[in-house]
């Protein structure tokens, strides 16, 4: 079963949630293998209701490498008492993910990491992702930038501010902070964040040479971004293969 945007009522809600739990758990495990996690911080979420307000998210204090499908919290973005429940989510995660799911129903999946290269890029005065190779060109026109970091996200206002900045983009470079990706499925968001990290690594590696960047023309960047947009099956194949590896080596992620 492929997890796609909930556009009809044909798929039972229980099946949508069950598959979402498995796909999201696989993403946690794989990001841990890639060392894209940070301690027991960072969060991934996936909306399981048609309106996008009910969503799955990792529990507070659980390492990515140990997350299982059943560990994921089912939260309601409209629940004013979410931080008072016995298994309350991390406050910063709640204020970011809760508000994005409440304000951006098209953002079915929200993934926020402090991965090494994306975070390093976010800390530069010029944190633009320039189109210098296929991976960086994938995100041409798809990146929003927030350069007004004012401390940790601990209020609805901060979550709403981030939602307004990302708008209809798929990536938010969070200045002095990290990166956030949104998408219609777990597979597409997972794949986008993976490739954004690779793109940031390439750009920073080029900067390290001290040589001038060879930036392609806008026309080439736009064309390549469109070609990437037509390559949608790649993300499904990527997550499918990740799950196939985990099914052999770490099958407990599904439990």
Image (spheres, helix red, strand yellow):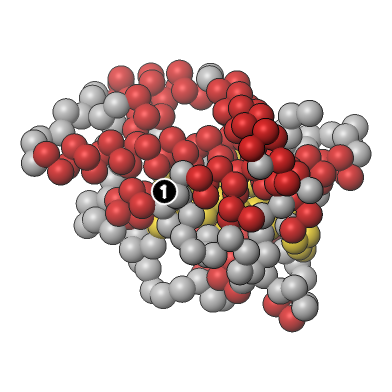
Q: Position of residue 21 (x, y in %)?
A: 75, 47
Residue name at image x 31 percent, y 41 percent: 201
Q: Position of residue 22 (x, y in %)?
A: 73, 43
Q: Position of residue 120 (x, y in %)?
A: 30, 54
| For residue 123, side relative to residue 169 (left or right) | left
Residue name at image x 53 percent, y 20 percent: 231
User: Which of 10 and 17 lies nearest the eye of the viewer?
Assistant: 17
Q: Is residue 172 visible?
A: no
Seen as rendered, the residue at the extreme bottom is 84
The crowd level at tag 1 (other Cα within 10 Å; few <14, some 14-19, many 20+) is some
Asked which quadrant contains residue 124, the reply is bottom left
Seen as rendered, the residue at the extreme left is 211
In the structure shown, which secondary structural element does the residue marked by tag 1 occupy? strand
Reading the image, the residue beneath label 1 is: 144
Asked which quadrant contains residue 59, the reply is bottom right
User: Which of 18 and 104 lies nearest the eye of the viewer?
Assistant: 18
User: Which of 53 and 21 lies nearest the eye of the viewer?
Assistant: 21
Residue name at image x 64 percent, y 55 percent: 66
User: Which of 28 and 112 lies nearest the eye of the viewer?
Assistant: 28
Image quarter of the N terminus: top right
Q: Is residue 74 visible?
A: yes
Q: Position of residue 254 (x, y in %)?
A: 75, 44
Tell me: residue 75, above or below residue 195: below
Residue name at image x 39 percent, y 62 percent: 177
| For residue 120, side relative to residue 151 (left or right) | left
């Amino acid at each position: 079963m492929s997890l796609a945007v909930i556009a009809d009522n044909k798929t039972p809600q229980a099946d949508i949630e069950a598959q979402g739990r498995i796909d999201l758990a696989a993403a946690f495990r794989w990001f841990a293998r890639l060392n894209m996690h940070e301690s027991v911080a960072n969060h991934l979420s996936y909306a399981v209701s048609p309106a996008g307000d009910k969503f799955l998210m990792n529990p507070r204090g659980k390492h990515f490498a140990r997350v299982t499908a059943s560990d994921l919290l089912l939260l309601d973005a409209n629940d004013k008492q979410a931080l008072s429940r016995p298994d309350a989510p991390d406050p910063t995660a709640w204020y970011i993910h809760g508000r994005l799911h409440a304000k951006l129903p098209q953002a079915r999946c929200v993934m926020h990491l402090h991965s090494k290269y994306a975070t390093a890029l976010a800390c530069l005065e010029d944190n633009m992702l320039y189109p210098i190779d296929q991976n960086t060109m994938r995100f041409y026109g798809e990146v929003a930038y927030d350069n007004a970091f004012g401390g940790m996200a601990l209020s609805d206002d901060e979550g709403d501010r981030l939602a307004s900045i990302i708008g209809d983009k798929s990536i938010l470079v969070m200045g002095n902070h990290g990166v956030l990706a949104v998408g219609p499925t777990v597979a597409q968001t997972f794949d986008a964040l993976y490739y954004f990290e690779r793109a940031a690594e390439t750009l920073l590696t080029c900067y390290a040479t001290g040589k001038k960047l060879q930036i392609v023309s806008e026309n080439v960047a736009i064309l390549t971004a469109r070609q990437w947009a037509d390559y949608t099956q790649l993300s499904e194949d990527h997550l499918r293969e990740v799950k196939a590896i985990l099914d052999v080596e770490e099958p407990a992620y599904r439990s």
